[in-house]
Amino acid sequence: MNLSIAIAPSGFKESLSARQAAEAIAEGVLRVLPDADLDLVPLVDGGEGTAEALAAATGGRLVPYPATGPLGHPVESHFALLGDGSAVVEMAAAAGLALVPPGLRDPGATTTYGVGELIRAALDAGARRVLVGCGDSGTSDGGAGALQALGVRLLDASGTELPYGGAVLGRLAAVDPGGLDPRLAHCELLVACNPFNVLCGERGVARVFGPQKGATPAQCEELSAALEHWAAALTGTFAPEVDLRSAPGTGASGGLGAGLAAVGARLLPRFEVLLDGLDLAARFGDADLVITGEGALDAQTVRGKVPGEVARRAREAGVPVLALAGTLGDGAEAAGLDAYESIAPGPLSLPDALEGAAGLLADAAERALRTILVGTRLVSRGRAHSARPPYGSSTAPRPGRAPSRPERTARRARPASPPRS
């Protein structure tokens, strides 16, 4: 019997797209099971690669666009025009962590201004429905930069416009919405976000994700206070329908969710938006095993990350799940996975891991599959022993001779299936 395996990873941040990760895992699996029936299901979460994947899935196209990067300098960015005429803005393309060199990472200083520029460019291109994908951000400015790019003025007590960054929001004295792009009122603006991320409070975005973006504990607290002030100012100016401090998704991408919600965007759970149309229940249900993966497995995995979502859906289908990750942190065991392991075979520097991620992932998939096969053979052997008739019986196998394996028909891996919008 040929095994059917669904390969459904996320991208590995700063190294592999979801498609590249799926192909690397498939390579490792086929080294062990050349006849396996593989279904490649690369999954995007709103971060790096989202615009490209959705454009490919709908017959759309990527539109190059020079935008303001997270450090305030121009970067080569893009958005997608989909086959139905709507647009996708991938916030990581203009404000992602990968665009901030490690030595310059300070979430109090980086900006989402370029995200607002991409939204404006999508409107210029005629889109009347814009989906903003949140993920892999290098910012924590509450979406202030995006609103500035869309025409909102943020003023200090002297009437001077605030510079970029989240830390300066503590000096905000007035929000002037007079220049807000009027086309937003006639556009459906959707934000695909992690609903577990909120702007303020003990689980607020500054405290939870600030350290990952380069902030010290003192900076996290300063930024948290600034975002509290920001939420109050936005609420007083725009009177949004959601609580900008604590509504699900307001903390997405360093608070970009809150900033866009203030001007009328709808915050939607990202997997409901991005995985719609993939029919994962059927595809996982047809599989004997699901393999997923991401850059890190930790306590955040169960809170809206791809491996946690894959584990949930595979569990509903009654199929075991294996996860491969660059790093394993505290809390990985709570993600609902049946098995997981690091792709690093031993101590490895981060630059080396990022550079060799595809090979490491393929090797890890091979190791994991060999281990799984040993386990299944042991189980089969144990069952055979328990059912074996006494020696001398005409049906007893000869000592020292293993049962023959059934003939296997070679089957090619199915081509990768990108998400459909």
Image (cartoon, rainbow, N blue to C red):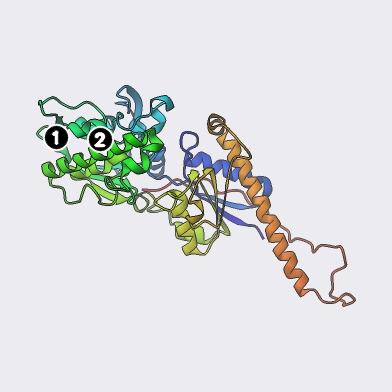
Horizontal side of 16 relative to 387 (left or right) equals left
Horizontal side of 188 relative to 74 (left or right) equals left
Q: Which residue is rendered at x = 84% and y = 75% of the image? A: 395
The quadrant of the picture occupied by the N terminus is bottom right
Residue 337 image offset from top left, x and y in percent? 52, 56
The picture quadrant where one finds residue 214 is: top left
Q: Which residue is rendered at x = 72% and y = 69% of the image? A: 383
Tell me the element at label 1: loop
Q: Which residue is rendered at x = 33% and y = 31% of the image? A: 94
Give the residue pinned by disc 2: 119
Q: Which residue is rendered at x = 88% and y = 66% of the image? A: 399
Residue 180, numbered label: 1
Q: Can residue 150 be seen in this snapshot?
A: no
Residue 342 image offset from top left, x and y in percent? 57, 44
Q: What's the distance in space between the residues labelled 1 and 2, CA to CA?
A: 12 Å
Q: Crowdedness of circle 2 by 10 Å Cα count: few (<14), some, many (20+)?
A: many
| Mark 2: amino acid | Ile
Residue 7 image offset from top left, x and y in percent? 53, 50
Nearer-N-terminus badge (1/2): 2
Nearest the eye: 399 or 172: 172
Tell me the element at label 2: helix
Residue 206 image offset from top left, x and y in percent? 32, 40
The picture quadrant where one finds residue 382 is: bottom right
Horizontal side of 251 relative to 291 (left or right) equals left
